[in-house]
Image (cartoon, rainbow, N blue to C red):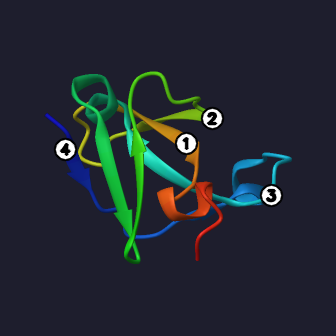
Amino acid sequence: MIMLYKPKSLINGYKLGLEREGQYVAVPQKMVLQHPLSIVYNGETMDIDKNTPILKEISFQDKFGRGKYKLLYYLWQPVDNLFGIK
């Protein structure tokens, strides 16, 4: 089963302290570990699973005091762009 994930925005690489330019998508770790994801942003789609390279991981404290959660950051590579189609 593939799950659908719609992020509110993409993140610039410089904000993450990454030297690679480009846009990145943040995904909660628990979503990636459970099922492959199809990420949809502005009508473009990117598929990720547990084998997709993670470029950065950041742990955060939950703002309601329920513990920590981890976000995994992936380079945004929509399927259309992988084949040079725009």
Instruction: Give the residue drawn at x 71%, y 58%.
Output: 15
Spatial CA span between label 3 and label 1: 13 Å
Residue under numbered circle 1:
73
**Which amino acid type is marked by label 2?**
Lys
Q: CA distance from mark 3 to mark 2?
A: 14 Å
Image quadrant occupied by the C terminus: bottom right
Q: Residues within 10 Å of mark 1 (few under 14, many from 20)?
A: many
Q: Nearer the viewer, mark 2 or mark 4?
A: 4
Quickly name the residue at label 3: 21
Side (left or right) of 63 relative to 71: left
Q: Provide the secondary structure element on which disc 3 rests.
A: loop
* Marks 4 and 1, the one that precedes in the sequence: 4
Q: Spatial distance from mark 2 to mark 4, Cα to Cα? A: 22 Å
**SS of the residue under disc 2:** strand
| Discs 1, 2 touching: Cβ within 8 Å | yes
Residue designated by label 2: 56
Residue 10: image x %, image y %? 53, 65
In the displayed structure, would residue 72 be above or below residue 15?
A: above
Q: Quadrant of residue 57?
A: top right
Extreme residue in the left direction: 1
Q: Is there CB contact under 8 Å for labels 3 and 2?
A: no
Quick one: label 4, few (<14), some, or many (20+) residues within 10 Å? Answer: few
- Residue 82 location, x and y as percent? 60, 54
Q: Position of residue 78 (x, y in %)?
A: 51, 59
Residue density around tag 3, few if under 14, some if 14–19, many if 20 or more, within 10 Å:
few
Q: Earlier in the sequence, mark 3 or mark 4?
A: 4
Answer with mark 1 or mark 2, whichever residue precedes in sequence.
Answer: 2
Tell me the residue that label 4 is attached to.
3
Of marks 3 and 2, which one's residue comes earlier in the chain?
3
Depth order, front residue of 31/68: 31
Amino acid type assigned to the residue bearing label 4 in the image: Met
